[in-house]
Amino acid sequence: MCFAPDATPPPLPSGAQPIPGEDLRLTSTDGTSYLAYQAKAASPTGSAVVILPDVRGLFGFYKNLASYFAAAGIDAIAIDYFARTAPDDNRAGEFDPWPHVRQTTTPTVRADIAAAKAHISELPHVTSVFPVGFCFGGGHAFALAAAGMGFAGVVGLYGRPYANSQDSPSAIEVTDQMDCPLQGFFGGADAGIPVDLVGEFDDVLTDSKVPHEIKIYDGAPHSYFDRSSAEWDDICQDTWTRMLNFISTNTAA
């Protein structure tokens, strides 16, 4: 599991307080009704993000993260993945995501992402939308750069650039099809995503001429982006700063 059920995101570098959002239900292209959480920016910048959670799906960490993005002037919507297989929307506590993760498919995940993107794009001030994914969601975010879905850029935190799904090519296999900038963050001590493979991903992106930034934090573990991980406060702040700058730089006027 990436984050503990009671984990919370690190604060913004600006110190801005999170803006509360609300639960809502979206309808995917296959008719599935699924849970999402939206937080609207009080001072919008034109940027919006679709937050793609880790393997647990939509729980408090990602709702709070959406509220922090809103505080930074970025409209945010976080989605769940498991409406087709789970009996309810509860992803806290003893919820076991793995039976549901194994039943996800790239087409259904992308259908849910597309519905969220369409929903948040209806806000009149939104000009550019970015997926921001973590772990399982990070791998999907990287591959979305080649999905032709009209994203302004993609951001992944400790997402696998390879073998994220068995039913579609991984991100490292489709760099020649990527049509937007990519930003990736990785922990140097993440045994599940070795740094040599991250380096290979970086090289392939360069060879494919994809505008990108890959940042590896020496010694950091998987899921370092957590307020309770005081040891990693500085790199969490650096991640926020780089991520917000990437989104700002790639947002259309």
Image: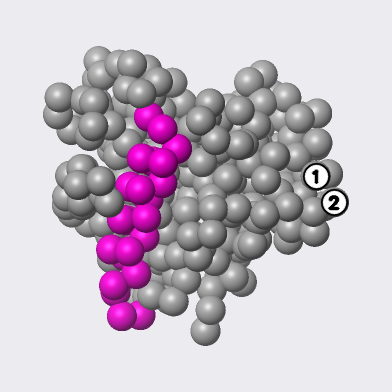
* Quadrant of the frame with the N terminus: top left
Q: Residue at x 72, y 29 (%)?
A: 188
Where is residue 93 drawn, in percent x and y? 24, 20
Image location (x, y in percent) of residue 186? 65, 36
* Residue range of the region highlighted in magenta in the rendering: 104-125
Q: CA distance from mark 1 to mark 2?
A: 5 Å
95 relative to 16 in the view: left or right: left
Residue topped by disc 2: 207
| Number of dots carrying numbers | 2
Q: Amino acid at mark 1?
A: Val
Quarter of the image where one finds residue 85 = top left
- Dividing the picture into quadrants, the one containing residue 245 is bottom right
Q: Nearer the viewer, residue 229 or 73?
A: 73
Residue 189, image x and y in percent? 69, 24
Disc 1 vs disc 2: Cβ atoms closer than 8 Å? yes
Label 1, secondary structure: give it: helix
Q: Which residue is mark 1?
A: 204
Residue 229: tell me if it is visible: no
